[in-house]
Amino acid sequence: MKELLTGNEAIARGAFESGITVAAAYPGTPSTEILENLVRYPGVYAQWSPNEKVAMEVGAGSAIGGARTLVTMKHVGVNVAADPLFTLAYAGVNGGLVLVSADDPGMHSSQNEQDNRNYAKFAKIPMLEPSNSQECKDMVGLGLEISEHFDTPVMLRITTRVAHSQGFVELGERKGGEAKPYVKNPPKYVMVPAHARGRHVVVEERRKKLQEYSDTCPINKIEWEDKNIGIITSGIVYEYVKEVAPQASVLKLGMTFPIPTGIIREFAAGVKELYVIEELEPFLEEQIRMLGIEVQGKDLFARVGEVSEKMVAEKLLYVTRYKELIDQSVLVQGVEAETDVPIPLRPPVMCPGCPHRGVFYTLNQLKLTVMGDIGCYTLGALPPLEAMDSCICMGASVGSALGMVKAHPEMQDKVVAVIGDSTFFHSGITGLLDVAYNKAATTTIIMDNSTTAMTGHQDHPATGKTLSKETTNQVDLPALVKALGINRVTVVDAFDIDQLKKIVKTEVETNEPSVIITKKPCVLLTKSENLPLTIDKDSCITCKKCMKLGCPALTAGDDEVTVNTALCTGCGLCAQLCPSDAFRKEGDVVGQQ
Amino acid sequence: MLLDNNKVTNILMVGVGGQGTILASRILSFLAQDKGYDVKVSEIHGMAQRGGSVVTQVRMGQKVHSPLIGEGQADFMLAFERLEAFRYLSYLKKSGTMIINDQAIAPVPVIMGLQKYPDSIVETIKSKVPDTIALDALGLARKCGNDKASNVVLMGVLARKMGFAKEQCYKALEAKVPPKFLELNKKAFEEGWNIQV
């Protein structure tokens, strides 16, 4: 039976069919839906971990224990998980382990576009790259076989376009599903120097065997067509190449580390012009050049952003002597774009009723230096709120606020860190421990909206629910903060602007570490019982103070402000800012309290 | 322009996060699958969904490799909002079909009074794209009892324009719409299907 699945759904399906029994992840676009789908299959234990490092460690224990295991994360998550990954590469596995790295060329939803194929080379483990949903499913199974046969974790790298595109997938039955017995083996699993030295030798031997295997691996294959042009490629770019140059010969690499040197030599010798087309880094190109083979790659294609069909056609047409092999229809101009009128941008915005809005409004009003973090609230950097000075990575706000006040002690009553609840559990806790330990008089604002909102509302250690929606232990956030050594902890309603402003002012001016927890669940989680607001035109003095909130439910005309009642959740932030009490609850009679 | 068996047909759906492009693409891909076509669909997730500009791409034909539609490659554009139709205009083939919901949702720069929402978008598009169908899908959906069904109203227009059979479309609705909303959506679909083109 065939079903239309996204790459992420197909990976979950592949994990189910190939007998995976344990899976762990931290949500992150574009990887999140893998575990959300996998948890629905019977016989699979799947969980959210507080961060990717822990997920990787759960995976390590499960694989050493003998279970087939899946660990998934977005590309930058692998940075967090790199420590256990690099040494698990020495220890090896018992049950197969596949680590999915969901990369984001073009940065649709990420802070950088690092190419995680480099991790495979760095950690000396195999790298598989599917091009479509069917391959996503198949390569999970193949990856597990490689993992068990060669006793190594295996990386499966997808990109946004593979993760979030649907294609047909042939469904199969589940096989296996029983963990192998665990066998105690300290020289293999206890990585003290004496053991690790021995294991490094094993790793190098394994690398050579994997190198040989790559030449026989069924997912590395030559598709001979016209031999005037030969293109080596992998992942989503393969699909673009097949659209643009269907008549050219293609070497499709499914296993991109180690590369199949024999097949590459054969292919290179068989074609007149040789190209390697890959997104981001010259990962294949450098390995091919190491073989002494001349190839054109990054001299044509940028290291920045995504590759497109149009780009493939343009670049190849520019250099090739065999232009007839390139389908030029992708270069045909469409309807002429509008140039006479400027088209306003439509950036993502905080939702109407978002509990983060009032916090950033307050920080903006107080003109504080705000060390930011990763989540929906990073939108607080955009106009009109513009209350963010930095955003580096998950958890960075807390430690970087500390660094800022150590660099500029005179700024200590000006610097705050803002971090969401899920991000705080991910990697803010250790930062806050540092703040307490080193007595940094910074204020950390934990914006607790009771969920992991940006990736689509996943549970976390303080929501009281697991990935499978079971009730579980719930961390007490103020108690946790106090236990870290922070004595000043205040909890405030995120919608009470006056109170919030007072507390923030007091806490930033205090000469010791402090934490403010602004609390209110994400508006998308709770059906608002408030009626939308309207504006009494006679009372409104058009001062537009409410417009400083950047709420999509408010529109400013030349001489009036109006509420879009279809969007308004009645949160009342705007009414708190109004100097002329012009806001009314819908249905209220004008003038009546 | 009807679906051509010998080539890949590209449908670009553009709108604002939360307008229901995903359901529309699910219905469309069901129709294609039912006809025995290969299908690829590409969606947007994550940060961009928060009220931002969203694009869903559907490609169908005997064999489809890429899930993406490049500039100048869309045979059909289903625009859920006027400004978004304007923004992605260059993705439509010169001979393509534009189906546009005559609804305006102001983006934040406009709401804040920093930029102006362009006037006469539909007229400009009609002058550039001969095969343009503009309709008040929101109004028609409201008539059926729910604003949210405007996506299915638009699907009604598109499905007929692409040459799908009505029975097949009903089958798609039954497969993709929760039973509770089926009658409403059938009514909405009918409104779109009956638009005079």
Image: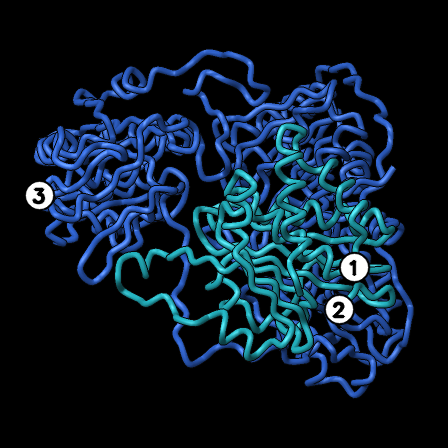
Element class at badge 2? loop
Q: Residues within 10 Å of mark 3 (few under 14, many from 20)?
A: few
* Residue name at image x 71 percent, y 40 percent: B173
A163 up-or-down from A487: above or below: below
Give the blue chain's letter: A
Drawn side of residue A578 relative to residue A250, left or right: left
Q: Do dots 1 and 3 share one subunit?
A: no
Looking at the rendered structure, the kind of residue marked 3 is Pro
Q: Pointer 3 indicates a residue of which chain?
A: A
Based on the displayed image, in which of its 4 quarters is residue A101 positioned? top right
Drawn side of residue A427 relative to residue A284, left or right: left
Would residue A204 be visible to someone looking at this image? yes
Toward the viewer: A78 or B188?
B188
Q: Pointer 1 indicates a residue of which chain?
A: B
Q: Which residue is mark 3?
A: A579
Drawn side of residue A84 relative to residue A402, left or right: right
A300 up-or-down from A349: above or below: below
Q: Which residue is mark 1?
A: B163
Determine whether label 1 and label 3 are within 8 Å by CB. no
Q: Position of residue B56 (x, y in %)?
A: 61, 54
Q: CA distance from mark 2 to mark 1?
A: 8 Å
Q: Which residue is mark 2?
A: B1
Toward the viewer: A573 or B96?
B96
Q: Residues within 10 Å of mark 1 (few under 14, many from 20)?
A: few
Chain B: its colour in the image is: cyan
Q: CA distance from mark 3 to mark 2?
A: 57 Å
Toward the viewer: B70 or A402?
B70
